[in-house]
Amino acid sequence: MFRNKREFKAEFHRRLVEAYGCEMEQTSPAEKYLTLGTMVRDYASNYWKDTKNETASQDLKQVYYFSMEFLLGRMLTSNLKNLGIYDIVTEGLQELGISYQEIADQENDPGLGNGGLGRLAACFMDSAASENYVVNGNCIRYRAGLFRQFINKYGEQVEMPDMWMRIGNPWEIRKLKHAVDVKFYGQIEVSYDENGDMHFRHRHASHVLAVPYDMPMIGAHTKTVNTLRLWSAEPADVAPRDRDYRQYLSDVEAICLNVYPDDSTEEGKYLRLKQEYFFVCAGVHSIVETHLKNHPSLDNLGEKVAIQLNDTHPVLVIPELMRVLMDEYGYAWDKAWQIVKETVSYTNHTVMAEALEKWPMQYIENLLPRIAMIISEIDRRYCAWAWQQCPDDPDLVSRTRPLRDGTLHMAALALIGSHAVNGVAGIHTEILKNDLFRDQVRLYPHLIQNKTNGVTPRRWLMYCNPELRKLLDDTIGTAWEKDYHHFEDLLKHVDDPSVQEAFLDVKQVRKEKLAAYVRDLTGEIIDPSSMIDTQAKRLHAYKRQLLNIMQVIYLYQRMKRDPSFRIAPHTYLFAAKAASSYTFAKSVIKLINCVAAKINNDPDTRDVLKVVFLPNYCVTMAETLVPGSDVSEQISTAGKEASGTGNMKFMMNGAITLGTLDGANVEIDSLVGRDNDVIFGHTVEELNTLQYHYNAYDYYQQDGRIHDVLDTLINGFWNGSADEFRMIYDELITRNDTYFVLADFDAYVKAQEEIARRYASRNTWARSCLVNIARSGYFSSDRTIEEYAHDIWDLQKLHF
Ligand code: BZD
């Protein structure tokens, strides 16, 4: 463990030569990155060991966060800074004549997820370790990420494999000694012993070996280093039964091949289910193994272990833990069920019907025969119990039971098997209580609670925006870096013109950096003094990127028609991946790119209106995009976005939210007030009424702006093909505009005008940005983790 620059340089040099057998100067940047990463991991290893030992000796409870996704982003800079060795390392490298940035740029974002749910899990890992909570992650070691996105010459998304580990992954350690045997398919043989107790034997199964790879999750300026355990599927040392040998190898290989394989085919569905059981079974097994090292039995599992289910994807934890407790450790049903409920809790991340997981029971019976038996028994017992609770409402049971018409409803199972269920923002939790889980609330009145999401202020402010960090340190000292409550210390300075000026200077620097990044990535030149308005998130109809681009089209048409109408210079940035099978979303990406191509090349407008689509949105891109933006587009249809977390990152970096009353926007709005954000559009309540008499065609007929914009979708205006965007037109008109884009169009145009008006008064604008930063402490995931620890996990901090 190096203690200073001199020792660092000597060790780095020695390790490079030893690892690659050549002079340091002859090693490649990738080799230097791998060597440095390994050194940093080894540096943290003593803390890692201490965290494990102390957890055991203090007999502390620990949490296992089960998530199909952990969208970590690059680890090098964040680990160096969290460990407090960034300066030693970067200066040491400089003295060796090596560029730190070149090394850091070798690291690929780990491709372990696709969106907000995965990024939330990563923020939680950072906050938990930084707050001295022992929270371990459990996930799959996907060899390929979601996909790398390219935009072709027609403006279309093209997916390329994301082989993020191609150069190696210095952060992980393979732990073969903890490998777990996972069984699929086969039959269950039931027998009775002399006491009449039942025994279950899994016969003719297909075995897969789950091998864990551990990654350290390093806290900021603490000694806590937690573990993210990634499971990799390997062929087992058991002869495959009834199967072609090569087929067996490729079936095993497929399990960890990539994130969310296409599930539109039957084969894809089985694969997804396999993935889910695979990491659940392995994770549960390793929890039990660890627990039994320190405790005589599993009786106190619920007291010493909490399992958090990040959405329903890992919900098979519930029947799997039942199976282990009963079949492997001889617990009776009732006692096992009590332990499971004490241990497990579930977070819901969506109310969108199509994203709620449902599985044909037949699949589960084939793939996981013993799990299917346990699920049926959970269902049977639930029905009997629920009948007694509400005899006045006989349908309640059929609406809430996990098994309905041969289909397993994963959310219903999660709810029954958990002691706590939470939504991820206030409005979302209310919708869960009043709508999605209304029936269940009658049976379990105190089960559902709110835990508003958060983001780590280290990655999302201190490390990605050092200029703003310095301004805050200079203005209010450094207490805010350790304690999110102290963000509010900035409130005393928001009226200070010198602080306002200093903020505008910081923003300008960040906008210039963003402009350089955009130029390098796309070749497009954007004006860093224009208002930079950004919508960066997954492409989905409910997020309404379409509304955004329609407003741009409207501005363009109006400027073309009326030369006296000019806007202040605006840059609209979009970044979004569309699921590869989501045709509508892909069509919106193409529309944005076609609009950009036309508008950016039109001499009449290009000085004031610019549109750029940034390909391959990822965590690393967001780290430049967020600090460089003025306006944060959060314009989902009210009631559809559970929380959003991008909204929090933009706010923390002093961007103004232009949003609907949806997800965490509602809480942003109550914290900053209407002077410091721009809120528009129908509310959930209004939409609940409007839906019964909504007629999108009326808007098309009655609003000339909408008419003119939509006509460009079917007259070949953008790329000469009249049918190119007919799908979008049909969604709005023929299918009556599922997400109320046209209903909110007028309000959105006005909101855009309002934000442009505010942007023009520079000092008032800066004041608003400062208020946003000051109020963003609430959205630190340190706060969120405290709440989970206190209200759900009953978790104490580790004391060193
Ligand atoms: O979770 C997102 C929500 O859409 C956001 O509103 C919220 O802020 C974040 C974090 O709570 N949900 C997801 O990211 N969901 C998925 O990615 C997903 C993936 C597979 C199947 C279903 C949902």
Image (spheres, rainbow, N blue to C red):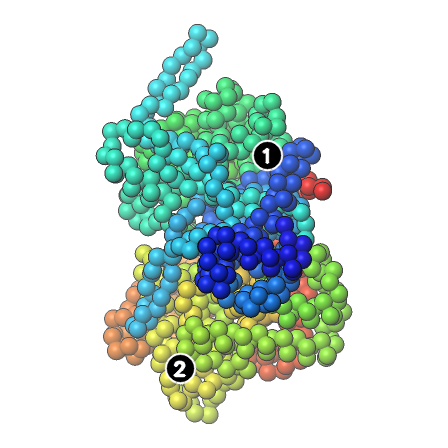
User: In front: 492, or 203?
Assistant: 203
Q: Is mark 1 on a helix, strand or loop?
A: strand
- Label 2 close to label 1 by CB (< 8 Å): no
According to the picture, the residue beneath numbered tag 2 turns out to be: 600
From the viewer's perspective, is 374 left or right of 342? left
The percent position of residue 192, horizontal first and vertical second, equals: 40, 12
From the viewer's perspective, is 676 left or right of 34? right
Q: Is mark 2 on a helix, strand or loop?
A: helix
**Residue type highlighted by circle 1:** Val
Answer whether residue 112 is visible to the viewer in this image. yes
- Rate crowding at label 1 as few (under 14), some (14 to 19) or many (20 or more) other CA atoms within 10 Å: many
User: In front: 677, or 371?
Assistant: 371
Q: Which of marks 2 and 1 is in front?
A: 1
According to the picture, the residue beneath numbered tag 1 turns out to be: 305
User: In front: 322, or 36?
Assistant: 36
* Residue occupying image coordinates x 31% and y 25%: 204
The percent position of residue 636, horizontal first and vertical second, equals: 48, 62
Mark 2 and mark 1 lie on one chain; the one further toward the N terminus is 1
What is the residue that sits farthest to the bottom in this orientation? 564
User: In front: 289, or 259?
Assistant: 289
**Residue type highlighted by circle 2:** Asn
Answer whether residue 393 is visible to the viewer in this image. no
Q: In the rendered view, would you say 63 is above or below 200?
A: below
